[in-house]
Image (cartoon, rainbow, N blue to C red):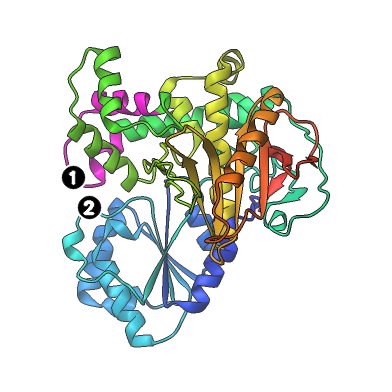
């Protein structure tokens, strides 16, 4: 029997089912939605392009039979038959019970005309990402992000992965199907996933015909600028400069919108705290894929190439950390943000909880940049207007090279990435 790796979403899904009639579990294809939903479901309907037509006939003849089964009942890839949305909503209304259905899907349905109601109050949306290092058991989890909000005097943990292993984890990504495979086999999955996006998925999501060559150019430019706040207009300029190709900003926006519907792109919103000065806070989202391996595939990189390109390695390491922090923030009922102001003070990640507490994080691949990261965090702390919002619960440098987890004399925590968990 194949091993089940517990996921952050397991608890979130169970909690949502206790309060709602149905839960929509959505996220990128291959991230493990079906497996996690199966782990809690009591009955299942598996949908694919062929079976969807058969179920369409069944629903027209006997709709009640489609929903007959022990609850919670999983309907996998429901978006292939969009009418299921309204039917699920009506069934929830009829039963008036919680925890009845789980819907899973890897794209926003193309035919929104078949959905007459948003589902608010009946169907709760829950987004799932690829595996964090703690979920894939590549992090020891000796330092809890949640515990840092209580400002412990000491933390413990030691790095156990090498820089080469970290480069591999960036390139492999958090895809459950790659666990346990050889390095060569594991690295093929992200490339195959990327190829399927540009050859099969580019029109599937909304029926709009698109050019695979244009999509590749946009994804490659987006990947080169990962973890920046680059404007879409700059992506156009980048493509024109390097590819001698005319791509409009509207075209870029259309393609990126499609990638968001497929959960390929997962951008980080800007944090807008109360600060003491009149400094302008930049509001552009930070560009990021749902998994760093997608950028790796777009740029045709390998672990060995990354070891020779420190700048690119650093930005892809940052993307990996943002992926993990996003998952841990959701577990803690928090939201992941990024801060940058007009004075070019940046903070790579800010996690703000529902109760207003927040912590700031700088992500540094190299050990020689730890002091720089700590200084940036302290500068940000000094800008906060504490008469209008809480001071930071913690400041942390998340490192790819530091050997140990510890608290500095200035109060800033330093944590190797393979020591962190939620």
Mark sitting earlier along the chain (1/2): 2
Which image quadrant: the C terminus?
Answer: bottom right
Is residue 29 shown in magenta? no
Which element is circle 2 on?
Answer: loop
Q: Position of residue 89 (x, y in %)?
A: 31, 76
As drawn, the residue found furthest toward the front would be 277
Of 239 and 193, nearer the camera is 239
Q: Is residue 342 left or right of residue 364?
A: left
Q: Is residue 168 left or right of residue 75?
A: right
For the point 36% across and 77% down, which residue is it? 121
Q: Position of residue 219 (x, y in %)?
A: 35, 28
**Crowd tier of the residue under label 1, counting other residues whose Cα lies within 10 Å: few below 14, some 14–19, many 20 or above:** few
Q: Position of residue 328 (x, y in %)?
A: 60, 53
Residue 110 has which mark?
A: 2
Residue 207 has which mark?
A: 1
Q: Is residue 138 above or below residue 120?
A: above
* Pointer 1 with pointer 2, Cβ within 8 A: yes
Q: Would you say the magenta stretch is mainly helix, strand or loop?
A: helix
Q: Determine the CA span between mark 1 and mark 2.
A: 7 Å
Residue 289 has which mark?
A: none
For the point 36% across and 76% down, which residue is it? 122
For the point 38% across and 46% down, which residue is it? 263
Is residue 219 shown in magenta? yes
**Residue 398 picture quarter:** top right
- Count of picture labels: 2
The stretch in magenta equals: 199-222
**Residue 246 picture quarter:** top left
């Amino acid at each position: 029997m194949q091993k089940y790796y517990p996921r952050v979403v397991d608890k979130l899904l169970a909690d949502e089912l206790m309060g709602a009639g149905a839960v929509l579990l959505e996220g990128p294809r291959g991230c493990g939605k079906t497996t996690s939903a199966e782990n809690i479901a009591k009955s299942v309907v598996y949908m694919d392009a062929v079976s969807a037509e058969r179920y369409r006939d069944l629903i027209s003849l006997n709709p009640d039979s489609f929903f007959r089964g022990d609850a919670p009942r999983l309907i996998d890839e429901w978006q292939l038959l969009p009418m299921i949305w309204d039917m699920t909503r009506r069934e929830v209304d009829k039963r008036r019970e919680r925890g009845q259905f789980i819907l899973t899907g890897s794209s926003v349905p193309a035919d929104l005309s078949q959905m007459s109601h948003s589902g608010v109050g009946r169907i709760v949306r829950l987004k799932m990402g690829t595996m964090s290092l703690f979920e894939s058991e590549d992090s020891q989890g000796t330092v809890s992000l949640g515990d840092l909000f209580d400002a412990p005097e000491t933390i413990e943990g030691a790095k156990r992965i090498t820089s080469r292993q970290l480069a591999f984890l960036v390139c492999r990504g958090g895809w459950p199907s790659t666990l346990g495979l050889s390095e060569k086999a594991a690295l093929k999955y992200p490339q195959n996933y990327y190829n399927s996006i540009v050859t099969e998925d580019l029109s599937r999501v909304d029926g709009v015909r698109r050019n695979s060559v244009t999509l590749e150019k946009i994804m490659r430019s987006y990947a080169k600028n990962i973890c920046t706040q680059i404007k879409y207009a700059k992506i156009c300029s980048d493509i024109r400069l390097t590819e001698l190709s005319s791509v409009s900003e509207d075209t870029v926006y259309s393609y990126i919108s499609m990638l968001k519907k497929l959960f390929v792109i997962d951008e980080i919103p800007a944090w807008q705290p109360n600060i003491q000065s009149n400094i302008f806070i930049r509001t552009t989202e930070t560009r990021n894929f749902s998994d760093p391996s997608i950028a790796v595939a777009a740029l045709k990189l390998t672990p060995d190439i990354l070891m020779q390109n420190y700048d690119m390695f650093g930005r892809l390491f940052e993307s990996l950390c943002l992926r993990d922090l996003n998952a841990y923030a959701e577990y803690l009922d928090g939201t992941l943000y990024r801060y940058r102001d007009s004075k070019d003070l940046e903070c790579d990640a800010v996690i703000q909880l529902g109760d207003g507490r927040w912590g700031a994080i700088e992500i540094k691949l190299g050990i020689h940049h730890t002091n720089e990261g700590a200084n940036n965090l302290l500068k940000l702390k000094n800008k906060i207007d504490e008469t209008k919002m809480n001071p930071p619960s913690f400041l942390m440098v998340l490192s790819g090279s530091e050997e140990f987890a510890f608290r500095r004399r200035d109060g800033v925590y330093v944590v190797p990435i393979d020591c962190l968990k939620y």
